[in-house]
Amino acid sequence: MLEVRRQHWLEMLAESWAQYPLEGCGLLIGEPGGDRVVRFVPIRNEAESARIYRLDGAEYSRAALQADKDDLDIIGVMHSHTHTAAYPSPTDVAEASKPLMPPNWHWVIVSLGWGHPELHSYKIVDGGIAEEPVRLAQ
Amino acid sequence: MAPTGKVREVLVATVSVRLPTVLRPAAGGQSSVEADGSTVGDVVKHLITEFPALETNLVDDEGAVRKFVNVYLNDEDIRFLDKLNTVVAEGDEVAILPAVAGG
């Protein structure tokens, strides 16, 4: 389960639209190993692509170090799908299955492609995809 | 005759190293540790000496940083600096993070 406050959902949506037609992305920050988003940090898509994303190194490093200083940690990653469903692509699965990827990370996908935006969250471990419930909190 | 050539001074600095979440158990659960060296490569070697379980995750058989590992020195990717030969200074922040990408 992932708990997302309304404010953070709106921030993820705003970032996804701001980067459109490119994919937008960002980091979910929370208690170490946690299931509740405490902060959403938009990160520049270094790939500047409508098909793939790659976290900008400088912004990624800065956000990770700041999380440590706040006794928080990265608990997941958000990216947008501009024209496809909010479901992990083969590239998403391959990248999320690489070594050093925490198995408890939440992989959030925001889809802009169907007239109304959707947010879904997944656990991706060793090539397997498991959707998890998302609780929208105030 | 007094030497006239300049001798390159190699300074050993102490830097903080932010470890990726999944490697923290191999370093006693710490999120960041201190390590010494004059280059990022030295710092990584020092880290591996202290915590041998990190080695196979961070570097390949030739000692190069693995492809799925990103190493940042003060928020700059060392691939765009001098890679493992990048010189470090006292108090620098090294962050080791898994590369994150997708489609």
Image (tube, coloured by chain):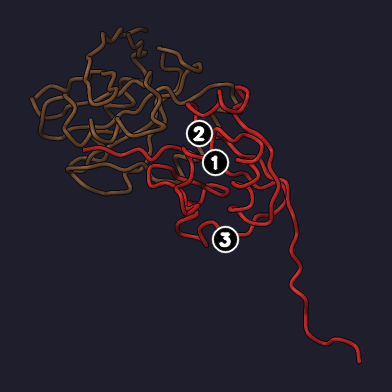
Chain colours: A brown, B red
**Mark 2 to mark 1 CA distance (whole Å):** 8 Å
**Which residue is the site of mark 2?**
A64
Q: Chain of mark 2?
A: A
Query: Of the residues shown, which amino acid type is indicated by label 3?
Result: Asn
Q: Quadrant location of the N terminus of chain B?
A: bottom right
* Nearer to me, B12 or A19: B12
Per the rendering, the mark at residue B95 is 1
Number of marks in picture: 3
Q: Residue at x 33, y 14 (%)?
A: A6
CA neighbours of label 1 inside 10 A, class few (<14), some (14 to 19), many (20+): many
Q: Residue at x 29, y 18 (%)?
A: A123
* Nearer to me, B39 or A56: B39
**Mark 3 to mark 1 CA distance (whole Å):** 16 Å
User: Closer to the observer: label 3 or label 1?
Assistant: 3
User: Closer to the observer: label 2 or label 1?
Assistant: 1
Q: Chain of mark 3?
A: B
**Which residue is the site of mark 3?**
B85
Against B53, is B3 above or below? below
CA neighbours of label 3 inside 10 A, class few (<14), some (14 to 19), many (20+): few
Answer with mark 3 or mark 1, whichever residue precedes in sequence.
3
Residue A23 rendering spot, x and y as whole percentages: 23, 39
Against B27, is B40 above or below? below
Q: Chain of mark 1?
A: B
Residue A52 rendering spot, x and y as whole percentages: 22, 42
Residue B88 rendering spot, x and y as whole percentages: 65, 55
* Nearer to me, A114 or A7: A114
Query: Of the residues shown, which amino acid type is indicated by label 1?
Result: Ala
CA neighbours of label 2 inside 10 A, class few (<14), some (14 to 19), many (20+): many
Residue contact at pointers 2 and 1, CB within 8 angstroms: yes
